[in-house]
Image (cartoon, rainbow, N blue to C red):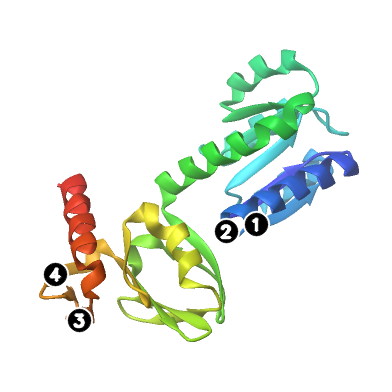
Amino acid sequence: MRIAICDTLEDDRNKLRNMIEEYDVSNHIGFIITEYMNGSDFIEKMESGAIYDMIFVDFNLEDMNGLMLAKKIRDIFKDVPIILISALMDHALDGYKVRANRFLFKENLDSAFTECMDDICEEIRQCSKTILLSCVEGEIRFNISEIMMLENNRHKCIIHLTDRYYHIYEKLDTLETMLKRYGFLRIHQSYLVNMQYIRSINNYVLTLQDGTQLSIPKARFQQVKQDYIAYVGKIT
């Protein structure tokens, strides 16, 4: 997830970057953060093709106010989440003029930041349903619906798509935490399956749409069946 910070003051940029990085460590999302100290440089980058998933804009920039920059952002990107930050609560109403997604008051930044990030990240997930992972092959942004299953293989995991696969040095437990909300089911110590690719579950065997068969331990079988039935009920 690509995040831009636009703030003239270095101390404020550093504080926000640290908060974003700490949030990333706790939530395993994968942020790429770019900083700008004025609106002109930011606009130039956007007009030359830079794309961001989330943009933090301080109201008091050295060359323009944050509201002016937010308007220019909206001219280029209609739906990108914009978070306005200001020391003055009076500026909050101005945020509606540019359809800012959130307004953060500097005095309450520490207490309001996590809830803001939770909401924005969830909105992005619901819209895009993609995930950025640091694989052996490089930084890969996956369309979650293309991931068929993940397989534990010693010190790394294999990410199986329908037509290719990637490798990642990450525990399957961590990947399960990241993907469970998207309909992924842990059927075995070594397998995490995207339930949309399940063809059948019978006699302790799960069959995927491509014919791949995976054994389900007896101790997990009933829970796996119940979780899959619940999933099917939600999507039908």
* Mark toward the start of the polypeptide (4 vs 1): 1
Residue on which the image places disc 4: 201
* Residue contact between numbered discs 4 and 1, judged by CB atoms under 8 Å: no
* Mark toward the start of the polypeptide (4 vs 3): 4
Mark 2 element type: loop
* Mark toward the start of the polypeptide (4 vs 2): 2
* Mark toward the start of the polypeptide (3 vs 1): 1
**Front-most of 78 and 172?**
172
Q: Amino acid at mark 1?
A: Val
**Front-most of 218 and 155?**
218
* Residue contact between numbered discs 2 and 1, judged by CB atoms under 8 Å: yes
Residue on which the image places disc 1: 25
Could you tell me residue 129's position as x and y percent?
41, 53
* Residue contact between numbered discs 4 and 2, judged by CB atoms under 8 Å: no
Residue at x 80%, y 23% (from the top left corner): 87
Residue 227 makes an appearance in the image: yes
